[in-house]
Amino acid sequence: MGRKKDHPKKHIISCRINTEEMEILRELSQDSGMSITSLLRKSLGALTHTNTVNA
């Protein structure tokens, strides 16, 4: 049995992106020293905090 987590992650989000978008994510991830997943989570937090989502 695994360790009990305070905030378990129960949901998976999947999307398709093009090669250019993937390269941007890889570069941002490498430059920041974070994984792509961590980078996306941090970006979501920033968007939520600033409430500036432009469609």
Image: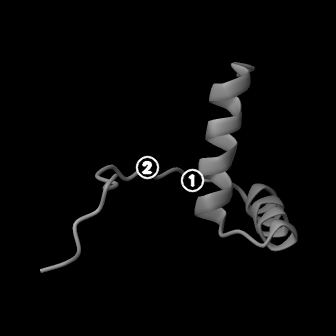
Image height check: is 34 above or below 40? Answer: below
Residue drawn where x is 34% and y is 52% of the image? 7
Residue drawn where x is 58% and y is 61% of the image? 37
For marks 1 and 2, give the CA distance. Answer: 10 Å
Q: Position of residue 53 (x, y in %)?
A: 70, 22
Residue drawn where x is 83% and y is 62% of the image? 28
Q: Which mark is residue 13?
A: 2
How many numbered discs? 2
Q: Position of residue 23 (x, y in %)?
A: 81, 66
Left or right placement of residue 50 versus residue 45 in this view = right
Between circles 1 and 2, the one closer to the viewer is 2
Q: Residue furthest bottom?
A: 1
Left or right placement of residue 51 versus residue 15 in this view = right
Q: Quadrant of residue 25?
A: bottom right
For mark 1, give the secondary structure. Answer: loop
What scheme was used to colour the molecule?
A: one colour
Q: Residues within 10 Å of mark 1 (few under 14, many from 20)?
A: few
Q: Residue furthest left?
A: 1
Q: Position of residue 52 (x, y in %)?
A: 74, 20
**Which amino acid, by three-letter code, is at mark 2?**
Ile
Q: Is residue 21 in sight in this rendering? A: yes
Quarter of the picture containing the C terminus is: top right
Quarter of the picture containing the N terminus is: bottom left
Q: Are marks 1 and 2 in contact (CB under 8 Å)?
A: no
Q: Is residue 55 in sight in this rendering? A: no
Q: Residues within 10 Å of mark 2 (few under 14, many from 20)?
A: few
Q: Quadrant of residue 5?
A: bottom left
Say which residue label 1 marks.
16
Q: Position of residue 50 (x, y in %)?
A: 74, 23
Q: Quadrant of residue 18?
A: bottom right
Residue drawn where x is 77% and y is 67% of the image? 29
**Which amino acid, by three-letter code, is at mark 1?**
Arg
